[in-house]
Amino acid sequence: MIKVMATGVFDILHPGHIHYLNESKKLGDYLSVVVARDVTAEKNGKKLFFDENSRMKMVSYLRMVDEAVLGSKVDMFDTVLAIEPNIITLGYDQKFTQSFIEEEMERRGMNVKVVRVSPYLEEKYQNSSAIRARLMKEI
C-alpha cells in the first residue's frame, strides 16, 4: 500500500484545496491529511476563521481523504514519522522545498518522495488569501 501525506491549513476550503487533495490521492492508495495547528498557522501569519478541530473535521468529510490528523505543535516532522508516508505532497504555494523535506526525512532514517502538486487555475479565487481579501472587502 502506498501512503500519501498532504498538509495544509485548510481554513477556507475551496476548489484549489480539492484539486490538491485529489491530485495527492491519485499518487497512492491511502491519503492522510495533516491539518496545521492554530498556533502554527498563526505563527506563519494566518488569521483563521475556523479553529483547528473544525478545520480537521471539514477535511475529514472529504471523499478522497482517508485520514485527517492535527499536526505537531513542536516539530512538523514528528507527524511525518508517526504517519510513515511513502509520498509527501506539497501544494504549489507551500513554502517548503522538495529537497529540504527529502533531506530531513533521510536524516531521520526515512526514504520519502516529495511531489509538488500543480496549481488549480480554473477559478478566479483559487487560494484562501484571494477569498479572504474578497470577503473582507465585501463586509
Image (cartoon, helix red, strand yellow):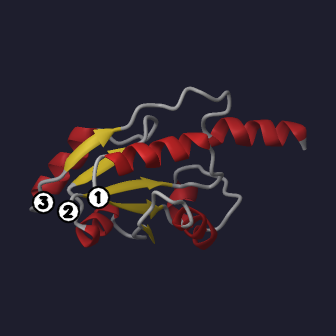
The residue sitting at 40% across, 42% down in the picture is: 23
The residue sitting at 67% across, 53% down in the picture is: 47
Q: CA distance from mark 1 to mark 3?
A: 19 Å
Query: Within the image, what quadrant is residue 73 found in?
Result: bottom left
Q: Nearer the viewer, residue 134 or 31?
A: 31
The answer to which of marks 1 and 3 sits earlier in the sequence is 1
Circles 1 and 2: CB distance less than 8 Å? yes
How many numbered marks does the figure carry?
3
Where residue 88 sits: x, y (%)?
29, 51
- The numbered disc on residue 29 is 1
Q: Nearer the viewer, residue 99 or 82?
A: 82
The answer to which of marks 2 and 3 sits earlier in the sequence is 2
Q: Which residue is mark 2?
A: 1
Apparent side of residue 84 relative to residue 70 in the rendered image (left or right): left
Where residue 17 sits: x, y (%)?
54, 46
In the displayed structure, would residue 28 be above or below residue 133? below
Q: Which residue is mark 3?
A: 110
Q: Sort mark 3 into few (<14), some (14-19) or many (20+) by Cα contacts within 10 Å.
A: some
SS at circle 3: loop
Residue type, numbered disc 2? Met
- Nearer to us: label 1 or label 3: 1
- The numbered disc on residue 65 is none
Query: Within the image, what quadrant is residue 58 found in?
Result: bottom right
Check the picture and name the quadrant holding the C terminus: top right
Residue type, numbered disc 3? Met
Q: Nearer the viewer, residue 126 or 108?
A: 126
Where residue 19 sits: x, y (%)?
50, 41
In the displayed structure, would residue 59 be above or below residue 132? below
